[in-house]
Amino acid sequence: MKKLICTILCLVAFTQAKAAEEVAFYVGQAHDEWAFKVTGKGRALAGKSLIYTRLDELQIVNNPKHSKTRYIESVEVAYAYINKDGVWDFKSVNSFHPVNKNVRPGEKLTIKDLEAGLDLGSKRARDYWVLVTLWLSKRETVHAHSRRDIFK
């Protein structure tokens, strides 16, 4: 019986993986006046019931225009969506990467191999896009994201 259940679960996983679509994506910001310039590239796998995202590399540069050292507590990979009010929101999937570092003006910080996954539930993959959040001291945040149509 245990072998039968294991076989069925493997078949379901294989079927979902076969139906999944892999897409390459980039994250960035719309505004270069922000405290940090954040860019990155990665790949995402979207199926009927889940999304898996891997950021191969994320580059963070403290914007020299501000000439201020800033402390980064952590980096989070999450998924953004449009809520019922027509405003964007995000779903945290507890994919925090601790940084705990002061970054001087113009200094570049590179983080590799960030991963996140999302169980879609009743939503579709195309309802989401990739969001990267820098958590700074005093609960300030800086966001960067992929295109909204990443999973279409």
Image (cartoon, helix red, strand yellow):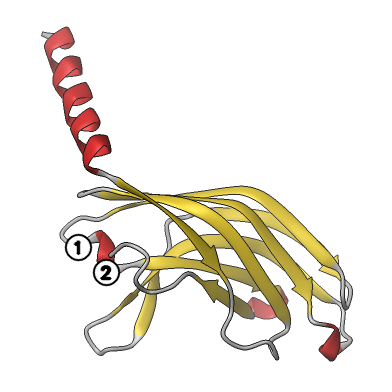
In whole angstroms, how far apart are the C-alphas of marks 2 and 1? 7 Å
Tell whether label 1 touches label 2 (CB within 8 Å).
yes
Q: Residues within 10 Å of mark 2 (few under 14, many from 20)?
A: some
| Residue at (67, 55) in percent of width and height | 98
| Residue at (58, 58) in percent of width and height | 41
Res 127 label: 2
Q: Amino acid at mark 2?
A: Asp
Apparent side of residue 129 relative to residue 98 in the rendered image (left or right)? left
x, y percentage for residue 126? 27, 65
Q: Quadrant of the C terminus?
A: bottom left
Quadrant position of residue 79 = bottom left
Name the residue beneath numbered marker 1. 123
Quick check: 66 above or below 122?
A: below
| Residue at (66, 71) in percent of width and height | 38
Apparent side of residue 136 relative to residue 11 in the rendered image (left or right)? right
Quadrant position of residue 7 = top left
Please state which of the two labelled residues, at mark 2 or mark 1, is closer to the viewer. 2
Q: Residues within 10 Å of mark 1 (few under 14, many from 20)?
A: few
| Residue at (72, 78) in percent of width and height | 36
Quick check: 46 above or below 147?
A: above
Determine the secondary structure under disc 1: loop
Res 13 label: none
Q: Quadrant of the N terminus?
A: top left
Determine the secondary structure under disc 2: helix
x, y percentage for residue 105? 88, 78
Quick check: 68 above or below 55?
A: below
Q: Nearer the viewer, residue 120 or 151?
A: 151
Q: Amino acid at mark 1?
A: Lys
Q: How many marks?
A: 2
Quick check: 81 above or below 114?
A: below
Apparent side of residue 11 relative to residue 137 in the rendered image (left or right)? left
x, y percentage for residue 18? 24, 36
